[in-house]
Image (spheres, rainbow, N blue to C red):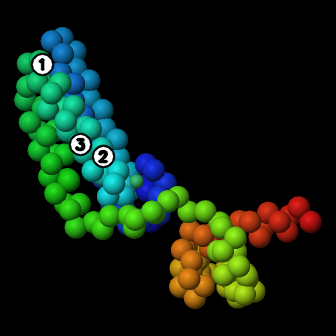
Amino acid sequence: MICQACGVEAPTRKVQFHKHTGMLIVMQHGHFGGNFCKRCINKYFAQFTGWTALAGWWGMISFFITPCVLLWNTGLYLTTLGLPAPAPGAAPPQLTQEAIDKLGPYTDRLFSALNAGRPHKQVAEEIAGLAGVTPMQVLLYINAVIEASQEG
Ligand SMILES: [Zn+2]
């Protein structure tokens, strides 16, 4: 739900892109992955695949590794085509005053569910649906309330 690359709250997919650099004697291989949103998948696919297509070929072994890397990245990219893009204006979740106002009436219900030992994620999704905020905002709200109670 949270993109590990840019932090935006959006549908994500677990991916790992590879990058290969061929050189006459040595070679470099790198990869980068995690649960990424569509925007980041597009970005890292283009970066890693473009780099490999240009810089991958320049070595005996690299010459054979490079097509594998290109195929891997492209195949992986194709599997993510159905992933919805982040909503326009999607941003890392923030606890806005609006979200606090919306969550206020549900505070008792929220904490009694947590005190009953129900998983945070499940409670957050339920309350998010009721209050019209996102589950991450509910989790941020929980932290904020707990911090406020510890200060007092
Ligand atoms: Zn992202």
Report which quarter residue 23 is drawn in.
Answer: top left
As drawn, 131 above or below 140: below
Ligand 1 quadrant in view: bottom left
Q: Amino acid at mark 2?
A: Lys
Count residues near mark 3 (Cα–Cα under 10 Å), then give few for <14, some for 14-19, many for 20+: some
Assess whether mark 2 and mark 3 are in contact (beta carbons under 8 angstroms).
Answer: yes
Q: Is residue 103 left or right of residue 77?
A: right
Label 1 to label 3: alpha-carbon separation: 20 Å
Q: Which residue is mark 2?
A: 43
- Residue 21: x and y in percent read 21, 24
The structure residue drawn at horizontal position 43% and vertical position 48%, both measured from the top left corner, is 5
Q: Which residue is mark 1?
A: 58
Q: Does residue 38 appear anywhere in the picture?
A: yes
Report which quarter residue 65 is drawn in.
Answer: top left
Q: Amino acid at mark 3?
A: Ala
- Residue 28: x and y in percent read 26, 24
Q: Is residue 93 left or right of residue 45?
A: right
